[in-house]
Amino acid sequence: MLKKSFFFGILCLALWACSEDDSGGPASSGDSFDRSAMLVNWADNIIIPAYLNFGGTTQALESAVASFTQNPSEATLQEARSAWQTAYIAFQQVSMFDIGPAETVFFRNRLNTYPANTTEIEDFIASGTYDLSLPSTMDAQGFPAMDYLLYGLGETDSEIVAFYSTNASATNYTNYLVNLAQIANSLTASVVANWNTGYRDTFVSNSGGSASASVDKLANDYVFYYEKALRAGKIGIPAGVFSNLPLPGNVEAFYKKDFSRQLALTSLQAAQDFFNGKHFAGNQTGKSFKSYLDYLNTIKNGEDLALLINAQFEDARAALNLLDENFVAQIEIDNSKMLNAFDELQRNVILLKVDMLQALDVNVDYIDADGD
């Protein structure tokens, strides 16, 4: 009887251990770092506040666009442009969080696929018939499409205003611009609502160390954003890193012209702040990738990995600050500075994607196909 009880106890312990591991608890993460506290900090102090802030800017954008199209003038055009700029900057602070509700609605792709397909946009406007929910239309909507419609239709502001007032297709131009602003606002409202009505708790509770756990998924999304959207999209592709020649037409905010650097710097700052667990609205910090690496005492070549990553963020920022605020002009005048900025950003890809993810025992879940 004692022997049976002993083996029964061993079996229960084994089943308990398997249960802990399968649920993504401490056994599966390999360490006792408080991942739950990190997820709470991410959700409550960074992600949700950033989305709420962005939601306010998309509401203002929809309102400013409505005012402009209802009363087209150079003054209302400037107000719509100002709202667009504010929202586009705020977008850089949420774009990396392509998880859960945002992933479901293709949030980043629908709001920031560039360059804008101006031929398709003009065809849609001419016909007055289109479905912007289709994946094939992602390059005809979002901030890049609004960039074209607010800055790229004419050489002067008066010429642009005419498209919404005296042009034979003024109603179609008006409807299209209004639709773009409404979609940006409705998508954002949907993402915010989902975070606040269930997804936040799902995200925080999924605190294990498996590939499907929140830390692993967001770590991959974060590194993917830094590598593909920031390093490659904003700098590498237009600078010609992945092609035979530079592609200045592929810069972000192509028609605004003097806005590309500000967007890139905002994106970089947001990535660094998230790495350090900095609260969105304040200077406080909470548990983060940095504190996780510190907890693990992660060393690379005799130096603290978290310090190396932050130092490289600073080097990348310095390289971006050397660029012209107009990336098209920078590429055409001295593309070597763009290439140098890419190199500085690339150095942190190695530290984040290889060294950090290995230290955190997170496997890369996306395919790298850009030849870097």
Image (cartoon, rainbow, N blue to C red):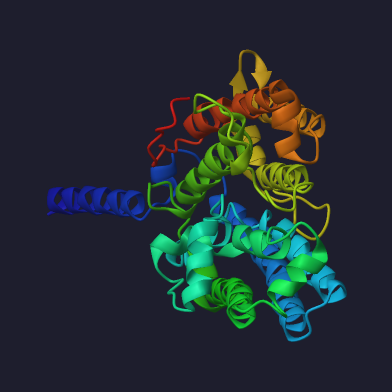
Left or right, 39 with respect to 52, comes to: left
Can residue 134 be seen by looking at this rendering?
Answer: yes
Residue 311 vertical position relative to residue 326 in the rendered view, above or below: above
Residue 352 vertical position relative to residue 89 in the rendered view, above or below: above
Hey, which quadrant is residue 164 in on the image? bottom right
Q: Residue at x 67, y 76 (%)?
A: 167
Residue 370 vertical position relative to residue 234 in the rendered view, above or below: above
Q: Nearer the viewer, residue 65 or 99?
A: 65
In the picture as drawn, the residue positioned furthest to the top comes out as 301
In the picture as drawn, the residue positioned furthest to the bottom comes out as 70
Q: Nearer the viewer, residue 68 or 52?
A: 68
Left or right, 210 with respect to 302, comes to: left
Left or right, 210 with respect to 340, comes to: left
Q: Nearer the viewer, residue 363 or 82?
A: 82
Q: Residue at x 62, y 57 (%)?
A: 144
Task: State the count of labels.
Answer: 0
Left or right, 199 with respect to 269, comes to: left
Can residue 316 be seen by looking at this rendering?
Answer: no
Residue 35: x and y, percent? 55, 50
Q: Residue at x 80, y 71 (%)?
A: 77
Residue 7: x and y, percent? 17, 48
Hey, which quadrant is residue 12 in on the image? bottom left
Q: Nearer the viewer, residue 13 or 174?
A: 174
Residue 316: x and y, percent? 72, 30
Hey, which quadrant is residue 236 in on the image? top right
Residue 64: x and y, percent? 76, 77
Q: Quadrant of the N terminus?
A: bottom left
Q: Residue at x 63, y 37 (%)?
A: 248
